């Protein structure tokens, strides 16, 4: 007998904490088990269709089960799935990254964004022989030790004191992270000046969550880090190949020393990459094992040929004419539509984002950093996301940040707008 969706969900709650793989904190009665994805849609065990606005956390940038990726992967799996060594596809992919990303002179692969930022920071620390890093409040750099510091602080404490969002992070780790306010160059400069001799790097999401950089902020960071001989690390896990083919560094014209890539690069397959200056990346050359600045970097699945084939197929599509025009047009339509609905219903909220990124924050004040969004109405935000979910929009109910793909068009954007209007009317 076919199990009901409810039975699947119960099984899921039995083995997975919170009934999910992470972050999707749906109530048990709403949670589902997915069986299939096609284009912009995902389907649960009962065949119920959702329009997907999470798209594998933004990794599935071409849409689910894209024929170009499927074909490339099928061809590769026939030839072997992992050698933990340089393969043709991995080499081609690394060469394409060097061509595409302004800071990329050399490349190392790993299997996730969490690892990519971890290695980027390790490389920076080794290169500069300094321990501290500057991270922006509210920024996410993956689930590694520093990524979970001051991610969702529940109280606002003085900068640059760190505030772990996760238990299990040692004091030693916390002591090496200085927290700064995004978009506030003056305070960030003061923190850097006060601690310059101990700081290895500043790590930043160039487009911080969905908050855009104020004019001069990234340029200012580049200038201060240069002045104090500190490395600038861009976490481009979200912005890479999304905000532009060359990522945020191409889009904003500010080139970091190292960048971490993930998500969209793999087209839905597990990927992470560290790209940057050759003199920094070369610290992980195994011939230097035992040298003072040698960096241990090992990844069983990093650069595996199946992921590399999927990534090459993804980049091939993204290089086609009008790709980014479409992504940007859809992003603009998404944000403008939300803004008109809010105006029509007399709701004060902020629509954030740029290009193919969009988030709604139920906040009166304009959002420029974590603190200006701190008093946002999170209860209403949760009602909103759960309302969207109930009405057939698949998203992460912990966040109003939406991801869409190249496959999304007017139909999907119109759908989320009409559902959003209905749900907002119910809530406000
Ligand atoms: C900016 C940023 N960096 C890093 C990561 C971590 O990537 P992964 O989940 O692949 O480890 C994420 C994930 O959401 C992210 O948004």
Image (cartoon, rainbow, N blue to C red):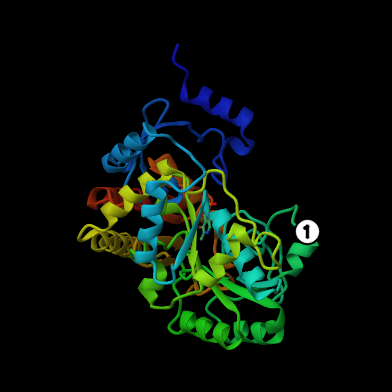
Q: Relative to 402, is 179 above or below?
A: below
- Looking at the picture, how far across and down is residue 340, in whole percent? 31, 64
In this view, the residue farthest toward the front is 287
Q: Relative to 410, is 36 above or below?
A: above
Quadrant of the image containing the C terminus: bottom left
Please state if 91 lies on the left or on the right of 372 as rendered. Answer: left
Name the one closer to the observer, 61 or 368: 61
- Looking at the picture, how far across and down is residue 5, in whole percent? 47, 25
User: Callout 1: helix, strand or loop?
Assistant: loop
Q: Residues within 10 Å of mark 1 (few under 14, many from 20)?
A: few
Please state if 67 lies on the left or on the right of 170 as rendered. Answer: left
Report the residue at 57% width, 29% height from top: 12
Report the residue at 41% width, 62% height from top: 240
Name the one closer to the observer, 224 or 73: 73
Quadrant of the rendered image containing residue 337 = bottom left
Q: Relative to 80, is 337 above or below?
A: below
Report the residue at 33% width, 34% height from top: 74
Q: What count of labels does the image hold?
A: 1
- Looking at the picture, how far across and down is residue 372, in whole percent? 55, 73
């Amino acid at each position: 007998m076919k199990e009901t969706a409810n039975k699947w969900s119960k099984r899921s709650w039995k083995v997975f904490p919170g009934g999910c793989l992470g972050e999707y904190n749906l109530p048990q009665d709403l949670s589902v088990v997915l069986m299939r994805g096609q284009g912009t849609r995902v389907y649960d065990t009962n065949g119920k269709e959702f329009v997907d606005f999470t798209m594998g956390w933004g990794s599935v940038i071409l849409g689910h089960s894209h024929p170009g990726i499927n074909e490339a992967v099928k061809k590769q799996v026939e030839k072997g799935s992992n050698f933990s060594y340089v393969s043709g596809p991995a080499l081609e992919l690394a060469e394409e990254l060097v061509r595409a990303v302004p800071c990329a002179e050399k490349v190392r692969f790993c299997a996730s964004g969490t690892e990519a930022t971890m290695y980027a920071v390790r490389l920076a620390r080794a290169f500069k022989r300094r321990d501290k890093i500057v991270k922006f409040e509210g920024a996410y750099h993956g689930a590694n030790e520093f990524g979970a510091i001051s991610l969702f602080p529940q109280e606002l404490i003085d900068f640059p004191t760190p505030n772990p969002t996760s238990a299990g992070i040692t004091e030693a780790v916390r002591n090496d992270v200085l927290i700064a306010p995004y978009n506030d160059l003056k305070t960030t400069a003061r923190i850097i000046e006060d601690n310059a001799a101990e700081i290895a790097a500043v790590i930043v999401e160039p487009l911080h969550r969905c908050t855009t950089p104020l004019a001069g902020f990234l340029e200012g960071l580049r200038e201060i880090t240069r002045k104090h001989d500190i490395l600038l690390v861009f976490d481009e896990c979200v912005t890479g190949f999304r905000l532009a083919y060359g990522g945020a560094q191409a889009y904003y014209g500010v080139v970091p020393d190292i960048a971490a890539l993930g998500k969209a690069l793999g087209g839905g397959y597990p990927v992470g990459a560290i790209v940057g200056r050759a003199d920094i990346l070369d610290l992980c050359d195994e011939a230097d094992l035992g040298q003072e600045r040698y960096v241990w970097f090992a990844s069983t699945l990093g650069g595996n040929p199946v992921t590399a084939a999927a990534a090459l197929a993804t980049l091939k599509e993204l290089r086609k004419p009008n790709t980014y025009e479409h992504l940007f047009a859809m992003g603009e339509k998404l944000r403008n539509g939300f803004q008109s609905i809010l105006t029509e219903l007399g709701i004060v909220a902020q629509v954030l984002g740029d290009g193919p990124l969009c988030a709604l924050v139920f906040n009166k004040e304009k959002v420029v950093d974590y603190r200006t969004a701190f008093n946002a109405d999170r209860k209403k935000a949760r009602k909103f996301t759960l309302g969207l979910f109930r009405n057939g929009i698949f998203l992460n109910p912990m966040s109003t940040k939406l991801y869409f793909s190249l496959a999304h068009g007017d139909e999907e954007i119109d759908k989320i707008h009409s559902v959003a209007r209905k749900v907002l009317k119910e809530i406000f």
